[in-house]
Image (spheres, rainbow, N blue to C red):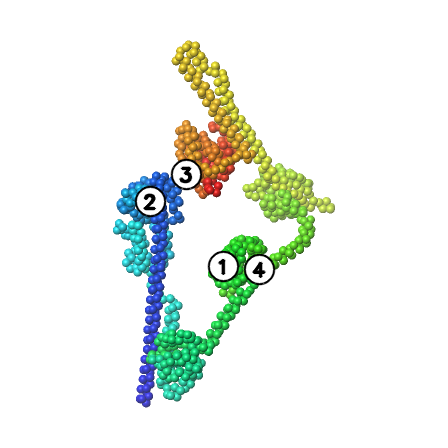
């Protein structure tokens, strides 16, 4: 009994130790696998960090190099024109500078003073600043002048009040020697820190890394642009970039430690658990063998031999210890070599000798070496193809004693199923390719994953082959580009969004015509996975048959049209007429209003049906007389004709209506209502008012023109009368008296007085004649414009030169009144007629001088889009608000009547408007009484295409 207990205790101790060893090995394997996975994750994170660091460094270099290129281009251009003006400098900067949101301004520095800056309006206050007052910038200037090299200054506090960088580029005389001695100034490119950081896109990496960017200058100054010193000290990834005058360092460290992917962690756990479980089961099996007697061992061998899978066990020296019958059967002719004690290598070579292993044919030694090497692994599994067509799955596991157990499962049926699935898939592909219609398959994101041969056919105009991965929207866009006509649900369309919505919503009736009059129809259906299937069927023949059918039905439709024409003729007349029909019942309620009412008035007839006419007219008393007459006729059941009244059918719009009506009576003479017609005659009343206004304008024009003609003519006739009757002049009488006396001094003085009178009279005659000529010229220009006989010679014209010439000619007018005349012009070539442009400028300047008694007249030009904009601004009397809108009309002036301080007939601005329009421009006026007037007009810029 004690012996039995001792055996049991020993067996229990051995089993417990073996189980503990297996569990320990699994734990070690698990820990090792976790450590390996952790190292791989950290290496992957480090590689990603280095790649991202390279991206940031590349963006910084590209941005800085672009700004250095701006500075060099600016310096090179200025060296060609050292005396560049501010306007030329701004134009140059506009050409050099591309879209770069971080660049604040571009400037030129002579000595230590800023002389030019762009953009001028935002930075004009910096011109004249002496940088010697700013020590940090003065030190950089001295360094650049001393070395003659480019320098990137910063980060530094800019004049604008925020941090930034300044690229200092030396400028040399053209053809001069480069170096500090040949320098004539500095070109500066100023860019701000915040937009610069946005430009390089650091926010793309903020969620993954702690980033620090340090700038070290040759002046031995360090500045942290981003991050802190801790990152610089602890970062594993440090990248240095040399730039002119500074070295930039980018340091990065991940924000989070690298972690093992959940899928990898689950795989490790599952593998260790499966291996451990299998090892424990196998260990328990071995212990049961050891405890049992020979009989039980024989029963176990019989059970193993009956197993459907092959099983084999080798010792630690790869010597065969145990195998079942299935293992021998699987080896066929090589089974004789499978004996206890036989090595794995001998069994493999026996199988090779009889051609058992299909994969070993032609590379036997390499294959054997690979199999033996695999055998030293603790756990392994692989698939083996035998020459008889059998596929085996071999699973090998190591025992605690160093032995190896292998299980061979027959997976031939599984493998054959896979082959059959591949064959079925290929057959499906072949069948789809054999379809006579186009077939496309898209995934749930509407990306193309499959198409057949017909779908891949290149229609006329297609430039590249169809490929998977293309989106449905891209496919629609390219097909629309080559199509000649697209119909969606029978309606022509070119809206890509509408077509895409219809296709993805399975609601399309899409028909497309391509080159060669080929018609196709597209159908779509959603798959169970959310994808999209699209078919394309050619319907060219169907279309042709439809056209033939349409042709054959033409005669029938023609006959139907003749029949319908006879029935619809009256309705057509009603629809085309500007009148509408109406009916009222015996209670005077509206029972019908034809559609002509809606077309003419723009109101809904249904809003008036069922109402009495008095109900909707009683709130409008503009024409009580005609309405009372209308009501009296209706109460008396009498016919009426052409009664005109007014009514607001729509708010803010007064309509004039002409109405006629006839009473209706039944066979017994009982009144049943009214029938009649009505017409909107608003345009006739409007035309009548316009004619009255035109007549009033004509009368006013005759009054003004007679006044304007009479004034200079009276002056001409009056002063001419003085000249023709000079003997009546006191100066002439004094001259005769002096001549009679013979006193030479008195004669000379009297002669000068007489000449002064004659000169004064001729001057007044000349001025009046000029005034008459100007008036006649305006009338002739107006006549030519209205007769469309005026001819303009549009060509390239230097607008700045023309304005300066006109101002020079009229400068005396400003001097006579003591007005200040200022110019702010840009150089702009316009596409215009030089003579007519001068005429417009002369009229506008003449008006400015005429209506301004003190203050200034300013002329300004600018370029906006493809137009040159000209402004003539004065500080004169201004124009009343109710007159601004009519000053460009014929014979209209800011002040009405003939008793005006300033003469004129109101044609100058009207002619200006017409001349500007003939030159493809526009003109407008802005004014405030007592403040002044601004006249603005635009002329197209000259281009090579003009």
- At label 2, counting other C-alpha atoms closer than 10 Å, the crowd grade (few under 14, some 14-19, many 20 or more) is many
Label 2 vs 4, first from the N-terminus = 2
Marks 4 and 3: in contact by CB < 8 Å?
no
Query: How far separated are the C-alphas under marks 2 and 1?
Result: 52 Å
- At label 4, counting other C-alpha atoms closer than 10 Å, the crowd grade (few under 14, some 14-19, many 20 or more) is some
Q: Position of residue 346 (x, y in %)?
A: 38, 80
Q: Quick one: which residue is furthest to the left in this view?
A: 220
Write down the residue under mark 4: 538
Q: Position of residue 518 (x, y in %)?
A: 57, 57
Label 3 vs 2, first from the N-terminus = 2
Identity of the residue drawn at 73% across and 46% down: 667
**Label 2: element kind:** strand
Q: Position of residue 568 (x, y in %)?
A: 67, 49
Write down the residue under mark 1: 465
Q: Quick one: which residue is furthest to the top in this view?
A: 741
Q: What quarter of the picture does the N terminus occupy?
A: bottom left
Q: Is residue 420 visible?
A: yes
Query: How far separated are the C-alphas under marks 3 and 2?
Result: 24 Å
Query: Relative to 686, is 712 on the left or the right?
Result: left
Write down the residue under mark 2: 187
Q: Quadrant of residue 176?
A: top left
Q: Is residue 435 above or below residue 128?
A: below
Query: Relative to 244, is 301 on the left or the right?
Result: right
Label 3 vs 4, first from the N-terminus = 4
State the mark number for residue 826: 3
Which residue occupies the foreground of this view, 646 or 940? 940
């Amino acid at each position: 009994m004690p012996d039995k207990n001792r055996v049991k205790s020993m067996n229990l101790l051995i089993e417990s130790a073996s189980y503990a060893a297996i569990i320990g090995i699994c734990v070690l394997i698990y820990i090792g696998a976790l450590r390996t996975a952790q190292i791989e994750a950290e290496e992957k994170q480090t590689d990603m960090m280095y790649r991202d660091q390279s991206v940031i460094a590349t963006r910084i270099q590209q941005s800085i190099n672009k700004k250095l290129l701006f500075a060099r281009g600016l310096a090179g251009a200025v060296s060609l024109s050292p005396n560049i003006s501010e306007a030329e400098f701004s134009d140059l900067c506009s050409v050099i500078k591309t879209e770069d949101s971080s660049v604040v301004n571009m400037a030129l520095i002579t000595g230590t003073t800023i002389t030019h800056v762009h953009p001028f309006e935002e930075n004009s206050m910096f011109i004249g600043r002496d940088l010697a007052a700013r020590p940090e910038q003065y030190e950089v200037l001295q360094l650049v002048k001393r070395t003659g090299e480019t320098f990137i200054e910063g980060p530094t506090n800019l004049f604008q009040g925020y941090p930034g960088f300044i690229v200092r580029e030396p400028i040399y005389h053209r053809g001069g020697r480069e170096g500090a001695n040949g320098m004539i100034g500095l070109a500066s490119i100023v860019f701000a820190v915040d937009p610069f950081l946005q430009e390089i896109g650091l926010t793309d990496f903020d969620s993954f890394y702690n980033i620090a960017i340090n700038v070290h200058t040759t002046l031995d100054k360090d500045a942290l642009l981003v991050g802190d010193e801790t990152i610089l000290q602890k970062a594993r990834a440090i990248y240095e970039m040399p730039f002119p005058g500074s070295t930039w360092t980018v340091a990065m460290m991940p924000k989070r430690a690298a972690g093992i992917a959940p899928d990898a962690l689950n795989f490790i756990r599952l593998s260790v658990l499966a291996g451990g479980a299998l090892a424990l089961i196998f260990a328990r099996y071995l212990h049961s063998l050891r405890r049992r007697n020979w009989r039980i061992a024989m029963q176990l061998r019989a059970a193993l031999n009956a197993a459907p899978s092959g099983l084999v066990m080798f010792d630690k020296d790869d010597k065969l210890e145990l195998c079942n019958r299935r293992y021998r059967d699987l080896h066929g002719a090589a089974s004789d070599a499978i004996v206890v004690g036989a090595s794995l290598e001998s069994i493999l070579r026996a199988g090779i000798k009889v051609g058992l292993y299909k994969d070993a044919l032609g590379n036997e030694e390499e294959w054997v070496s690979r199999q033996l090497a695999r055998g030293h692994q603790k756990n392994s599994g692989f698939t083996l193809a035998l020459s008889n067509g059998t596929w085996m799955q071999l699973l090998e596991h190591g025992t605690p004693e160093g032995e190896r157990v292998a299980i061979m499962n027959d997976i031939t049926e599984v493998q054959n199923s896979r082959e059959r699935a591949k064959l079925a898939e290929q057959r499906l592909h072949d069948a789809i390719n054999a379809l006579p219609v186009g077939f496309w398959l898209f995934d749930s994101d509407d990306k193309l994953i499959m198409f057949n041969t017909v779908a891949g056919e290149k229609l006329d105009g297609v430039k590249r082959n169809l490929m998977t991965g293309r989106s449905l929207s891209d496919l629609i866009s390219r097909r629309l580009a080559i199509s000649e006509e697209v119909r969606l649900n029978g309606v022509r369309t070119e809206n890509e969004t509408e077509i895409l919505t219809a296709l993805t919503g399975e609601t399309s009736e899409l028909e497309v015509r391509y080159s060669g009059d080929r018609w196709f129809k597209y159908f779509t259906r959603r798959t169970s996975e959310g994808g999209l299937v699209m078919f394309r069927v050619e319907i060219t023949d169907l279309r042709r048959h439809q056209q033939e059918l349409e042709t054959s039905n033409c005669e029938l439709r023609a006959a139907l049209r003749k029949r319908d024409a006879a029935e619809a003729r009256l309705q057509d007349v009603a629809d085309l007429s500007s009148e509408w029909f109406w009916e009222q019942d015996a209670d005077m309620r509206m029972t019908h209003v034809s559609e002509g009412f809606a077309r003419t008035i723009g109101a809904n007839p249904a809003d008036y049906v069922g109402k009495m006419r008095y109900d909707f007219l009683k709130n409008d008393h503009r024409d009580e007389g005609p309405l009372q007459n209308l009501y009296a006729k209706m109460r008396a059941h009498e016919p009426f004709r052409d009664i005109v009244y007014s009514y607001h059918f729509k708010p803010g719009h007064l309509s004039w209506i002409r109405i006629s009506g006839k009473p209706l009576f039944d066979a017994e003479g009982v009144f049943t209502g009214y029938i009649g017609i009505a017409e909107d005659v608003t345009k006739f009343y409007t035309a009548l008012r316009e004619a009255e206004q035109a007549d009033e304008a004509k009368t006013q024009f005759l009054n003004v023109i007679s006044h304007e003609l009479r004034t200079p003519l009276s002056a001409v006739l009056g002063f001419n009368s003085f000249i023709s009757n000079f003997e009546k002049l006191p100066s002439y009488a004094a001259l005769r008296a002096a001549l009679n006396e013979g006193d030479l001094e008195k004669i000379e003085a009297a002669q000068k007085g007489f000449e002064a009178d004659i000169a004064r009279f001729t001057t007044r005659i000349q001025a009046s004649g000029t005034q008459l000529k100007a008036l006649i010229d305006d009338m002739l220009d107006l006549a030519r414009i209205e007769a469309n006989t005026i001819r303009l010679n549009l060509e390239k014209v230097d607008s700045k030169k023309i304005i300066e010439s006109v101002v020079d000619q009229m400068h005396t007018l400003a001097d006579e009144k003591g007005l200040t005349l200022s110019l702010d012009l840009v150089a702009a070539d316009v596409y215009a007629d030089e003579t007519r442009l001068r005429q417009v400028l002369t009229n506008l300047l003449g008006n400015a001088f005429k209506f301004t008694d003190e203050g200034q007249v300013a002329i300004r030009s600018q370029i906006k889009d493809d137009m040159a904009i000209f402004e003539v601004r004065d500080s004169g009397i201004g124009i009343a608000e109710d007159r601004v809108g009519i000053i460009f009309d014929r014979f209209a002036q800011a002040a009405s009547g003939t008793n005006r301080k300033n003469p004129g007939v109101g044609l100058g601005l009207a002619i200006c408007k017409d001349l500007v329009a003939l030159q493809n421009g526009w003109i407008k006026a802005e004014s405030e009484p007592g403040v002044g007037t601004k006249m603005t007009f635009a002329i197209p810029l000259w281009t090579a295409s003009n």
